[in-house]
Amino acid sequence: MNIAQPYLLFLGDVTDPLAAKTARGIVKWRPDACLGELRLTEQTVSLGLEPLSLGDAKAMGAKNAGYWHSECRWCHPAKLGRNAGTSGASWI
């Protein structure tokens, strides 16, 4: 599977560092593919990446925004990402 790069890592409102382990792995093993992170709250786990909005990430060339859960409170940002031109099929 080939997921277009670069990525905006969408962390939603995750406060448990273990819940962000997939994103942390991407940052560790593919730092060159990571443009930044999008956190919904100040309490959200940070991966130490540049904080970016969806619009800023798209302007910087983001092809995908990665997230790990499908909780309803995150649906709106996901739709914004698709509307901003990231590939809906490759949201991880």
Image (cartoon, rainbow, N blue to C red):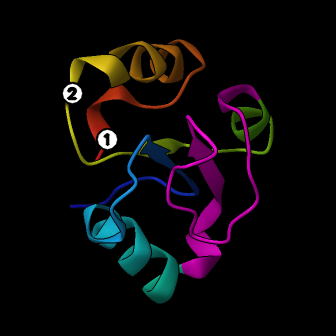
Report the magenta residues as a range: 31-55
- Which residue is denoted by mark 1 in the rendering? 90
- Which residue is denoted by mark 2 in the rendering? 71
Q: Does the magenta stretch include residue 25?
A: no
Helix, strand or loop status at disc 1:
helix
Which picture quadrant has residue 17? bottom left
Q: Distance between the residues labelled 2 and 1?
A: 17 Å
* Residue pictured at 60% horizontal, 65% vertical: 34
The residue lying toward the viewer, choosing from 50 and 55, is 50
> Mark 1 Cα within 10 Å, few/some/many (few <14, many 20+)?
some
| Farthest residue, direction bottom | 29
* Residue pictured at 35% horizontal, 55% vertical: 3
Percent coordinates x, y for residue 92 in the rendering: 28, 47
Q: What residue type is labelled 2?
A: Glu
Picture layout, residue 70 above or below residue 10: above
Which picture quadrant has residue 35? bottom right
* Residue pictured at 20% horizontal, 61% vertical: 1
Q: What residue type is labelled 1?
A: Ser
The residue lying toward the viewer, choosing from 78 and 62, is 78
Q: Does the magenta stretch include residue 44?
A: yes
Percent coordinates x, y for residue 51 in the rendering: 74, 50
